[in-house]
Amino acid sequence: MYGIILAGGSGTRFWPISREQSPKQLQKIVGSETMVQSTIRRLLPLIPIEKLYLGTNHQQAIETHRQLAPFGFSGNHIIAEPCNRNTALAIGLMAKVLVDKDPDAVMSVFPADHVITDSESFIKVLQKAEALAQKGFLVTLGIPPTRPETGFGYLQQGSKIEGFEGACQVKQFVEKPDLNTAKQYLEEGTYFWNCGVFIWKAATLLEELGKYANNIHSQLENITNCLQNSKGNSTYLELNEKGQGLFSSLPSISIDYAVMEKSSKVALIPADIGWNDVGAWNALDDVSEKDSSGNIIKGNVQALDCQSSIIQGQNRLIAVLGLKDTVVVDSPDALLVCAKERSQDVKKLVEALKKNNCPEAKLPATVKRPWGSYTVLDSGPGYLLKRIEVLPGETLSLQSHQHRSEHWTVAAGIADIVLDEETFQLKVNGSITIPKSSKHRLGNPSSELLIIFEVQFGDILDEADISRYEDRYGRC
């Protein structure tokens, strides 16, 4: 069996920890690992690392590869999508890649940002599903509901499938219900939560995609032929310009709408596996340890007389007093305070921030780049202070700025510097001024992390004020 991990979501309900350019699956929301790392570890008892593939947005591809590299995950098994086109296209593309490699491949599909606490039962369910998929079924896992939930889609149990204990056909897919309907589903006992985990032969999925969504299916070979290795030290698969155009032109539709709700080959296996989609901050109530007052506390927090609250800090001290059923989440550049019952509405809050062009809606305090990262520490009229970290062996583009000069000071490591026609090195405590309009480049020639403090001076201090002349990552 092959495993396909879908890691393209934005996770806006977990703002301010999760941002558009640093989403939920790359964060340590539950436990000591990021959610995508936990997903990989969960699958390894059944699926070897060389049979795992992952699809993500191109903006997260490098950081995703860095997080999975300790597992031995190959960058050539990461496909970076140029834009979000939902799950039908992402899954179809992965199915085409697998069929070209192994015509009899069984593929299982998993979201990258869910929690499953009963790993042993999870593996057993997948083994049963694999056997059913070999018979030509499109298998989906159904979670036995524990409450009348209005935030999930449902699967209605149909007739039993002979020879596979517990397996049945799916009578119908049901959209997210209202509360009264959800209560009725819970009482009837024939409805299951749709958790978005699928198992099928790649060839079977492609056949059904050809029947019900041929506008997507007909372009999969063309798109696959446009895959190429990315540039830079952290390699992954990306689409060339032609492939990006094809991918972007196709409809954005889920695999449920495109295939599952139309196919007669859909099978359901009930899966009591301790599943939680961790869809908003209040979901931590079900998957995290609590103190004696029902609080979930993380980070540098001093809490007094608080009950049933979620308080997430980092290095800065967070002191809270007398809170009840409240969410408090601190990050270096933004603070969230909301009633726990309104956790789902954090998404609306992020939408309002975007509408008001607040950079905190998209960018985290520390912005990842192919060469490393930068963090804005302070800013004011005419100046901006950054901490820049350059990974060993990495190099920024040869660039210039029309509206600002820069002053660099090396705090750790060794810096390779190009300034117009000169090339030289700076060590710790060394500094240099980069005049406005001068061509310059910063690189790290050593095996240690390079840390630079950069002060910008000018009338426009914006990432858009970069003219690139050479770049190993193809950003010119």
Image (cartoon, rainbow, N blue to C red):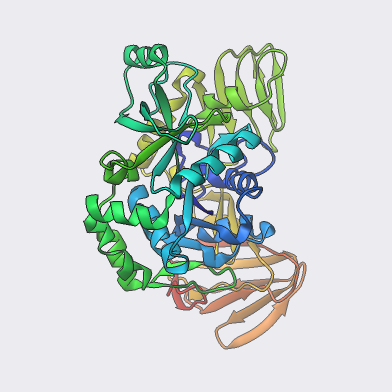
Q: Residue at x 55, y 69 (%)?
A: 235
- Residue 328 pos. (x, y %): 57, 26
Q: Nearer the viewer, residue 361 or 247?
A: 247
Task: Name the residue located 26 percent from the left edge and 57 percent from the top edge.
Answer: 216
Labels in figure, total: 0
**Outermost residue, front side:** 163
Residue 182 shows up from this direction: yes
**Nearer to the camera, 312 or 225:** 225
Which residue occupies the extreme right position in the image?
A: 428
Above/below status of 231 relative to 116: below
Name, please, the residue furthest toward the bottom.
421
102 horizontally vs 319: left or right: left
The N terminus: image quadrant: bottom right
Instruction: Tell me what residue is drawn at x 64 percent, y 27 percent.
Output: 288
Residue 232 location, x and y as percent? Answer: 55, 73
Question: What residue is rendered at 50% in x and 35% in y?
Answer: 14
Q: Nearer the viewer, residue 366 or 170?
A: 170
Where residue 22 appears, as percent x and y from the top left, is: 52, 48
The location of residue 321, given as percent across then percent down, is: 65, 15
Q: Nearer the viewer, residue 211 or 296?
A: 211
Q: Would residue 9 be visible to someone looking at this image?
A: no
Question: Image check: 469 left or right of 313?
Answer: left
Quick one: quadrant of the C terminus? bottom left
Q: Is residue 465 above or below residue 256?
A: below
Give the quadrant of residue 122: top right
